[in-house]
Amino acid sequence: MADKDSALHREAIMGRSWWQPIVLGIVLIVAGLFMLRNAVAATVISAIVFGIALLVVGIVEIIYSFWAPHWGGLVWGLLVGAFYAIGGAVLVADPLAASVLLTLVFAAAMIASGAVRIFLAVQDWQPFGWLLLASGIVGILAGLVILAKWPLSGLWVFGLVVGIDLLLHGIWWVAHGWTARHEPRPA
């Protein structure tokens, strides 16, 4: 029963053809390779796209806040919307400077996340606790490497991370579509 449900779920996600996820995967792989080839341009483009998204969300939040049932909801909605819109405008106005600042925050978050993973691994050692410990150590080391090269790392870190993510996600889609072509189709 679970196999039939998972096959139906995959069918709903992928549609009736196995080649669609392969095409999507190839597009993601090409985009990832482009980003890895020019990480600085990818960082700037990512900052601009993220900034536009924040700006739109901020404007929608501000408009939506006028339908709040209480004055407090109006004030909080306006405040949240203004923060989103201002953050988005800053990202769009100067994506290089914003990327440098975001990279500093990203490095600090990686170090903090790595420390938490190490603590959790030592605190509650499971059969794969060594994997969590290794993940924490790598997170801390990656954050320290980014900090050591900061502010220059702000120009390429996000492009590199997004490029690797797109590349790996694309490989997954290709593998998913390739294996799905041999699965029987539910009636």
Image (cartoon, grey):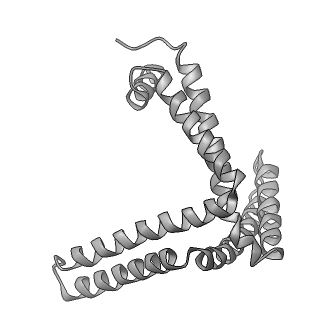
Determine whether, in the image, residue 114 is placed left or right of residue 63. Answer: right
Q: Where is residue 126 in the image (x, y as percent from the top left)?
A: 75, 49
User: Residue at point 70% right, 52% down?
Assistant: 36
Instruction: State whether residue 96 is above or below residue 162.
Output: below
Q: Which residue is drawn at the image coordinates 55% and 68% (left, top)?
A: 47
Q: Where in the figure is residue 181, as x and y percent of width and height?
A: 53, 16
- Of residue 101 and residue 127, the one placed in the foreground of this image is 101
95, 167: nearer the viewer: 95
The quadrant of the picture occupied by the N terminus is: top left
Q: Judge from the rendering whether residue 55 lies leftward or rightward of residue 38; answer left or right.
A: left
Q: Quadrant of residue 155?
A: bottom right
How far across and down, in percent of the image, does residue 140 sit?
Answer: 79, 67
Residue at point 62% right, 27% down?
175
- On screen, 110 above or below 167? below
Quadrant hosting residue 159: bottom right
Vertical side of 140 occupied by 30: above or below: above
Of 131 and 38, the residue lying toward us: 38
Q: What is the quadrant of residue 177 in the picture?
A: top right
Residue 113 location (% of width, % of height): 69, 67
Quarter of the image for the C terminus: give it.
top left
Tell me which residue sits at (61%, 40%) in the image.
30
- Does any portion of residue 112 appear in the rendered image? no
79 and 125: which is toward the camera: 79
